[in-house]
Image: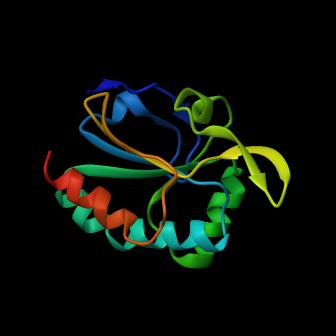
Amino acid sequence: MTRQAPDFTLPSTDGEITLSALGGKVVLYFYPRDDTPGCTLEAQDFDRLAPQFAAAGAKVIGISRDTLASHQKFCGKHGLGITLASDTGTVAEDYGVWVEKNLYGKKSMGIERSTFLIADGRILSEWRKVKVAGHAEAVLAAAQTL
């Protein structure tokens, strides 16, 4: 079952991006924070596979609540070429990934690591509570079958 992908316009490391203007296939992956161990590995995996995603006609966009300056520093430090966007509004809420987290008994709101495969404005696949190991490869396999 597919559903309409919530549209958005956000600042990114590639300038302002609007989902509906991208067309084709888009991989949106939401991650908690720049330059943390799991988020760094996930970004490196998507970046390493970027040529294969491009060959499958898919654009990869990572989204977190970090600032654009933080994204630029993160990309520079790790040599990342993928697009990272700053959720300056309600995009995480719109996708249902802004959730209450419980870490060592402390509750706080944050992004649940999740990925959405979108084609022509429709969500075709989604992954929730993502484990980083092998995830980018699984998303690539799904993108290649569309």
**Relative side of 94 to 54, left or right:** right
Q: Residue at x 52, y 52 (%)?
A: 129
Image quadrant assignment for residue 89: top right
Say if 58 sits above or below 109 in the image.
below
Say if 25 sits above or below 58 in the image.
above
Say if 140 sits above or below 6 in the image.
below
**Relative side of 141 to 46, left or right:** left
Say if 120 sits above or below 82 in the image.
above
Residue 116 location (% of width, % of height): 39, 43
How many marks the image carries: the answer is: 0
Image quadrant occupied by the N terminus: top left
**Relative side of 36 to 134, left or right:** right
Taking depth in this image into account, of 27 and 128 the one nearest to the observer is 128
Residue 48 location (% of width, % of height): 36, 74
Q: Residue at x 51, y 76 (%)?
A: 79
Taking depth in this image into account, of 124 and 19 the one nearest to the observer is 124
Q: Please, which residue is most extreme toward the front here? A: 105
Taking depth in this image into account, of 90 and 125 the one nearest to the observer is 125
Image quadrant occupied by the C terminus: top left
Q: Residue at x 63, y 62 (%)?
A: 72
Q: Residue at x 45, y 66 (%)?
A: 81
Residue 143 location (% of width, % of height): 22, 51
Image quadrant assignment for residue 22: top left
Taking depth in this image into account, of 38 and 50 the one nearest to the observer is 38
